[in-house]
Image: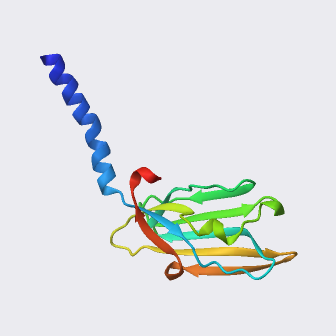
């Protein structure tokens, strides 16, 4: 009987922190459905800046891309996160469809500071590049189920 109670107690205590963390954390998928490029342009790089949020996961990492993520964990201001990405070679340049469906999963935090996001895309054609800036209002940010990411 003591062994049964001990095992039950261990199981309850080991599951409890996971349940508490899961309820406290809200995850959000970020998409950019309306990335408009000029004829012949493709995406050679991008930067995603978050305020009061961190990157939880990147569901689809393109081949031949260098991606760096600097996640603040809401310990010190400005509670910001940056993800920089660049294609290593021209054949790896992306089409706008890459951003159309949940290209990154984020965790919002710092309840006293409003969440903000900005996506900067480097559009390239031959030797010319231009910067396309998409503010939060141009992004789709929707809450998702935890087990999805």
Image: 135 above or below 45: below
For residue 88, say whether it is visible.
yes
Residue depicted at x 37% and y 67%: 110
Residue depicted at x 59% and y 80%: 134
For residue 52, say whether it is visible.
no
Q: Nearer the viewer, residue 148 or 43?
A: 148
Q: How is the image coloured?
A: rainbow
Q: In this view, which residue lies farthest toward the left?
A: 1
Quarter residue 79 falls in: bottom left
- The spot of residue 44 in percent (x, y) is 75, 68
Residue depicted at x 24% and y 35%: 13
The mark total stands at: 0
| Quarter of the figure that contains the N terminus | top left
Residue 34 as seen in the image, left or right of residue 11: right
Residue depicted at x 64% and y 78%: 35
- The spot of residue 142 in percent (x, y) is 43, 69
- The spot of residue 48 in percent (x, y) is 58, 69
- The spot of residue 29 in percent (x, y) is 48, 64
Residue 85 as seen in the image, left or right of residue 72: right
Residue 110 as seen in the image, left or right of residue 141: left
Image: 102 above or below 6: below
Q: Nearer the viewer, residue 81 or 27?
A: 27
Q: Nearer the viewer, residue 113 or 143?
A: 143
């Amino acid at each position: 009987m003591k062994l049964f109670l001990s095992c039950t107690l261990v199981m309850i205590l080991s599951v409890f922190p996971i349940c508490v963390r899961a309820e406290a954390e809200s995850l959000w998928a970020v998409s950019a459905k309306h990335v408009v490029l000029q004829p012949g342009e493709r995406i050679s790089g991008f930067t995603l800046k978050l305020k009061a949020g961190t990157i939880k996961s990147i569901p689809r990492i393109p081949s031949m891309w260098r991606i760096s993520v600097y996640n603040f964990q809401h310990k010190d201001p400005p509670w910001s996160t940056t993800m920089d990405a660049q294609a290593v070679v021209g054949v790896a340049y992306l089409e706008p469809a890459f951003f159309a469906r949940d290209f990154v999963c984020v965790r919002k935090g710092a309840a006293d500071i409003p969440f903000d996001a900005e996506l900067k895309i480097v559009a390239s054609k031959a030797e010319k590049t231009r910067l396309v800036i998409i503010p939060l209002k141009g992004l789709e940010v929707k809450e998702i189920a935890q087990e999805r990411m």
